[in-house]
Amino acid sequence: MAKLFTTIIITITLISKHFFVVFPVVSGANAGLSRDLAALFSFSFSITNDPQGVLHSWSSPEIHTCNWTGVTCHPVKDRVVQLDLSGRDLEGVISPAVANLSFLAVLDLSGNFLSGRIPPEIGSLSRLKQLSLSSNLLVGAIPIELGFLRRLVYLDLGGNQLNHRIPESLFCSCSSLQYMDLSNNSLSGEIPLGNQCRLLDLRFLLLWSNNLVGPIPSSLANSTKLEWIDLESNYLSGELPSKIFDKTPFLQFLYLSYNNLTSHGGNSKLEPFFDSLVNCSRLQELELAGNSLGGEIPASIGSLSNLVQLHLEENFLYGPIPPNISNLVNLTYLNLSNNVLNGSIPPDISRLKKLERVYLSNNLLSGEIPVALGELPHLGLLDISGNMLSGSIPENFSNLTQLRRLMLHNNRLSGRLPPSLGNCVNLEILDLSYNQLTGRIPGDVAALSSLKLYFNLSNNFLEGSIPLELSKMDMILALDLSSNNFSGKIPPQLGSCIALEYLNFSSNALRGPLPRSIGGLPYLEVLDLSSNLLEGAMPESLKASSTLKLLNISYNNFSGIVPEEGVFALLTMDSFLGNPGLCGSISGMSECGTTSKRVHSMILPILVTLISTPCILCFCVYPLARKSRSRRSQLRPFFQRTVSVEDAEEGRQPDYPRISYQQLADATGEFSELNLIGSGRFGQVYKGTLPDETTRIAVKVLNPKTGVDISKSFKRECQVLKRTRHRNLIRIITTCSKPDFKALVLPLMPNGSLESHLYPLNAATGSGLSLVQLVNIASDIAEGIAYLHHYSPVRVIHCDLKPSNVLLDEDMTALVSDFGIARLMSGGADENNESIDSSSSCISTTGLLCGSVGYIAPEYGMGGQASMQGDVLERIQHRNLIRITGFKALVLPFMSNGSLESYLHPQAQQYSSAAQLRLLERSN
Ligand SMILES: *[C@@H]1O[C@H](CO)[C@@H](O)[C@H](O)[C@H]1NC(C)=O
Ligand SMILES: *[C@@H]1O[C@H](CO)[C@@H](O)[C@H](O)[C@H]1NC(C)=O
Ligand SMILES: *[C@@H]1O[C@H](CO)[C@@H](O)[C@H](O)[C@H]1NC(C)=O
Ligand SMILES: *[C@@H]1O[C@H](CO)[C@@H](O)[C@H](O)[C@H]1NC(C)=O
Ligand SMILES: *[C@@H]1O[C@H](CO)[C@@H](O)[C@H](O)[C@H]1NC(C)=O
Ligand SMILES: *[C@@H]1O[C@H](CO)[C@@H](O)[C@H](O)[C@H]1NC(C)=O
Ligand SMILES: *[C@@H]1O[C@H](CO)[C@@H](O)[C@H](O)[C@H]1NC(C)=O
């Protein structure tokens, strides 16, 4: 017998292209193990790609089979009892030979790229307790033979492409099953649990996201140990069961959303279903959304006192919200949106002190917003939009300090905006549009600089001027004040809202010119100023904008020539209607005449062009007469957060020291090689001394020939440097920019870069950094990066953190530098589908690989999005920095900041591994 196997092994070795194996010739002493060896070998032969090299040990003659990666043997019988190759990225098919591992109790091949069908031979593994083939690319039907696995406790075939019906044998013969997960496949037909079949031990039944039809089988009532039922996203039909869940006292999670289920009494009574749940005292989550269920929400819902999440949205529930919903004191998530509920919001809802997210939108709720809602200490999201709520916004919403999203739009709210809303310092979205609000925008509300996504006040009766405080919203993406009665001028300070992509001031009574700072907003895509009383010429900055896609200035009093460049080349007459003073070449617009008016209107652009041509005078604004100032003030960041009115109106960069190309050339000895202190992909860095003989500078000259868009990189670095102020981040003194020359002027760091200390060119000088210095440096870097990630006005992802980008000043304080490829992030914590998609929150740097080779975070190499984790991963992976004691410990805590999303979308469907662990403990 053993001889036969040896022959087989040798044959296979000869034909194997993938594994060069010199197999140990197993003696006849253990025929069983040699049989296992043959099976494992056949198994490995059908694996075509093993990127992690996990099967290397399988081909090493020195390593005993029982010590191969993923293989576990019985301690006494010396037979393979477990094959666990989960999450190893293996490609290929599952060889039927695994069926010859006749002592196998655990077969876990989940999380690979295995394709083909599930071999029916697996059904002969009579000792198998756990079978996990989830998250692969398996196709075809589930083999009927799996029903022969009488001892099977745990079956997970989820996340494949399996189709056809579920074999009845699975439900009828695998009588030991505790965990069954067939979710996320394309299985069809009914759930095959006939009356004759019983799964007495079943605790987890996960069939979500398939194409299952028919009713929820009533014989599920025999499975009295059920804890977790997830049948979501199928086509199950029939009435909600009323005689199953009264027999499942251990039920914790019941997910029946997105099916075709109805309520009793011709889809009019939910009582029978809810009454059957009254003894499910452990029920935590109940999801019935998207079923077209009719009926009122029964009062008995109040008995589900352990409920944490309740999802009843997208049904046809009518009638009032029952007051005893306030018994659900453990509720954190309540979603009743998109129904036809009427009546008022029960004030007793304030008893639900744990509520974090409340969605009551798109119903017919009326009455006032209960003041009691302001007493929910953990409320993070309140969406009561799309109802008929009247009265004013309660003053005490100011108590909702955790509130991130407040959506009250499309109601009949009146009165003034309470200034106390300004206390909601975590707000990211504030949508009050389509109401009947009056009065001015209170300064405190306009100063809500936490707003990240949008601030929408459109379609109200608000008046007064646009508050200057809005300029503090420097993370906001969209600002909509349209269709109100706002008057006065557009404040130029709004140019500080640098993340803005969408700005709508249409249909108000705004006057005066359009400030050029608005056209200069770096990410602006949509600008709608139509139907106001604005006047004057189009600012040059609009023409120069590379991001603007949509501009509407119709029905104003704008005058002068409409340029043909930039966004203007894409626009039609619709954008300019009702401005009799405008002329230009756009079809339908009056040609610019030959009157003196035309000459006049051309002088300005020519002058502007002349002045802004930096070849003549290299952009230089501020005399070096100020050079006698102390070094400290020279290094002051030139961008002040609160721009003064005067500066902004003149469009001048405040506090911007003047320096010319010639002065830089003089300072660096005509950019002499002797002064070259560094060079990289983006250009060279020269040291120099300003004419005052005291200020030592580093001049970073960006290389125009790198092929990447240099002005983009320059602009980005300027933007980042302008917006950041931190002890551990390099600051900028000034910039010098002309078409063929762009340079940043930075303070010279006497101690050079961290790299020069870690890898000294002259080994004799040694690293010289003491452990204390290293720890301090690591801590400085962490502080700087944490600031960029979490506290700077615009979130910044550095993308290229490495020792050469860390500079050391005279007392060895580390400063992070080189933001040339940094990403500005406007949102950060936003990946859910209901908000702006994440791609819009990062600048695209086409053709630019993020990071430097050797320091690149793995996800960037795969074309992933820039992420904060990327910055940190880069550091951790770098062998020299991980050696700096304490570095990991210093960086990681900053990342553990739970994002809003992590608590808005907890757990999801990631329970299976936890469930698996628990099960294995028990079935031992
Ligand atoms: C497996 O490896 C361990 C440690 O590497 C060794 O002690 C043991 O003897 C090996 N077992 C067999 C069966 O070779
Ligand atoms: C399993 O072992 C038997 C011999 O016991 C052999 O005939 C058969 O081919 C093996 N099955 C597979 C799929 O390798
Ligand atoms: C199993 O459930 C079916 C349907 O509810 C029922 O007819 C049958 O009697 C149950 N069997 C047992 C043993 O409880
Ligand atoms: C709930 O439990 C009580 C007491 O254990 C019992 O009397 C009642 O019939 C049960 N209700 C349901 C619907 O099973
Ligand atoms: C689900 O129900 C709707 C209306 O009740 C019906 O139009 C639809 O065909 C049903 N879908 C399936 C797959 O049964
Ligand atoms: C809400 O804030 C007001 C003052 O702004 C305070 O008097 C009241 O006690 C707070 N209510 C709660 C429930 O914290
Ligand atoms: C308010 O404005 C934001 C940003 O433009 C938009 O996403 C949102 O849908 C608007 N709200 C309504 C009710 O239209």
Image (spheres, rainbow, N blue to C red):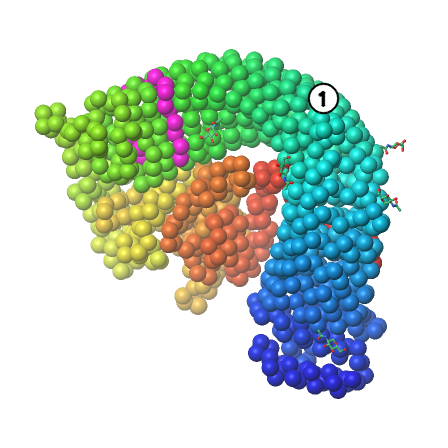
Q: Tell me where residue 793 appears, x and y as whole percent.
A: 45, 36
**Along the line of sight, which residue is nearer the eye, 283 or 578?**
578
Q: Amino acid at mark 1?
A: Pro
In the image, residue 527 sits, relative to residue 737, either above or below, namely above
Q: Is residue 489 visible?
A: no
Q: Tell me where residue 775 appears, x and y as whole percent.
A: 54, 53
| Residue drawn where x is 21% and y is 28% of the image | 589
| Residue drawn where x is 26% and y is 52% of the image | 668
Residue topped by disc 1: 322
Magenta segment: 501-522
Tag 1 secondary structure: loop
Q: Tell me where residue 281 appears, x and y as whole percent.
A: 81, 35
Q: Tell me where residue 82 appears, x and y as whole percent.
A: 75, 66
Position of 862 compared to 300: left or right?
Answer: left
Task: Using a 10 Å C-alpha cutoff, classify the residue at mark 1 as few (fewer than 14 neighbours), some (14 to 19) or many (20 or more).
Answer: some
Q: Is residue 762 visible?
A: yes
Give the image quarter of residue 154: bottom right
**Along the line of sight, which residue is nearer the eye, 42 or 270?**
270
